[in-house]
Image: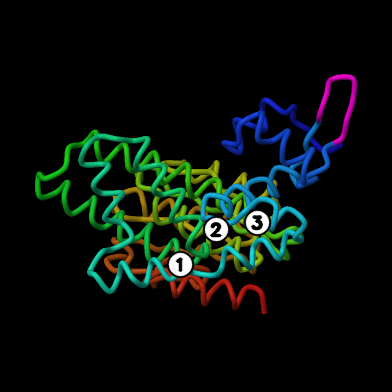
Amino acid sequence: MQTRYPIRAVAKITGISLDTLRAWERRYRAVVPLRSDRGRQYGTEEIDRLLLLNQLVKRGHSIGTIASLQDQELKNLLEQQPVAIAQEAARGIRPIDSVLEAVQKYDAVAAGDELSRLAAIFSPRELVYQVVIPLMREVGEQWHAGKMAVAQEHMTSHLLRNLLGSLMRLYRSPNPSTRIVVATPAGEPHEFGILAAAMLASMAGIEPVYIGSDLPAEEIIETARRVNANTVLLGITILHESTISDIRKIAEGLPERGEVWIGGLSVVTIDTAPLGDKIVVLNDLPAFEEECRRLQA
């Protein structure tokens, strides 16, 4: 049975106020939730549609003009990049500059609002390459240069994790042809790379089973077995003595045709020859996208 949520829970999930939710339903029939003795009950399809509508309204569309559109038509609207971004670029303003300014002021609310605005403007793929990756790189460089505090780096990490998690859910394929387990091995705390990859996998029609960072090999293998996934993606930026052993263990724990894809800053230093032919090295995210296409072929 599909899980359903009351209107107050949906308001928290979508960021849409109770009054606005009721108005969208009453005036425009933007969604039609089930009714029960407990009130309105929303399924995941209604929630996903509300997220789409909310992003478009933030981008400047009138709810009255978009409420009758099909979900795919709403997604198509989100793919259209407005002229404002091009105009800002012509003036030398980067999409991430306003986010960085808010982070410098320790203003998590403003930074989050700006990330939400960018998510409504860019397509998911553009968001990864033009916002998420440049922001990660800039924050990392400023932190290493002593221009940004640890608290600011953690603030940015939290905001991006929430943003990418919600977008992965919004753009997941309704009928994924295959699954891929996404994680980092034990001792690896950095997850931005695998979050971005999971989002790109969703857009390629692959269901990412995202289990997070710093996980023992045994848990990764068990997850792959339980969800019937033949492919595991590992993000590696810090190379520990045990990392090679964990990669080998995961590869051996997969089915005969299974593969372990490894990507991140440290993969260039890994000698994969002794690990066998189940290992696929990814030098960057475009290489990951190419492997996703191969997996789909």
Specify which label sits upstream in the sequence, 2 or 3: 3
| Mark 2 Cα-neighbour bin, 10 Å: few <14, some 14–19, many ≥20 | many
Q: Distance of mark 1 from mark 3, alpha carbons?
A: 16 Å
Contact? badges 2 and 3 (CB < 8 Å): no
Tell me the mark number nearer the camera, choosing from 1 and 3. Answer: 1
In front: 95, or 178?
A: 95
Q: Amino acid at mark 2?
A: Val
Q: What's the image's color scheme?
A: rainbow
Q: Distance of mark 2 from mark 3, alpha carbons?
A: 18 Å
Tell me the mark number nearer the camera, choosing from 2 and 3. Answer: 3
Residue carrying label 2: 232
In front: 91, or 171?
A: 91
Q: Amino acid at mark 3?
A: Arg
| Relative horizontal placement of residue 89, taking residue 158 as reference (left or right) | left
Q: Is residue 189 above or below residue 35?
A: below
In front: 193, or 86?
A: 86
Q: Quadrant of the N terminus?
A: top right
Residue carrying label 1: 126
Secondary structure under tag 2 reads strand
Residue at the spot x=60%, y=36% of the render? 16
Secondary structure under tag 1 reads helix
Residue carrying label 3: 172
Tell me the mark number nearer the camera, choosing from 2 and 1. Answer: 1
Q: Where residue 194 sits in the image (x, y, percent)?
A: 45, 55
Residue at the spot x=11%, y=45% of the render? 147
Q: Where residue 104 sits in the image (x, y, percent)?
A: 20, 41
Q: Which secondary structure is most common in the magenta stretch?
A: strand
Q: Which mark is residue 8?
A: none
Question: Which residues are the magenta region?
Answer: 34-40
Specify which label sits upstream in the sequence, 2 or 1: 1
Specify which label sits upstream in the sequence, 1 or 3: 1
Contact? badges 2 and 1 (CB < 8 Å): no
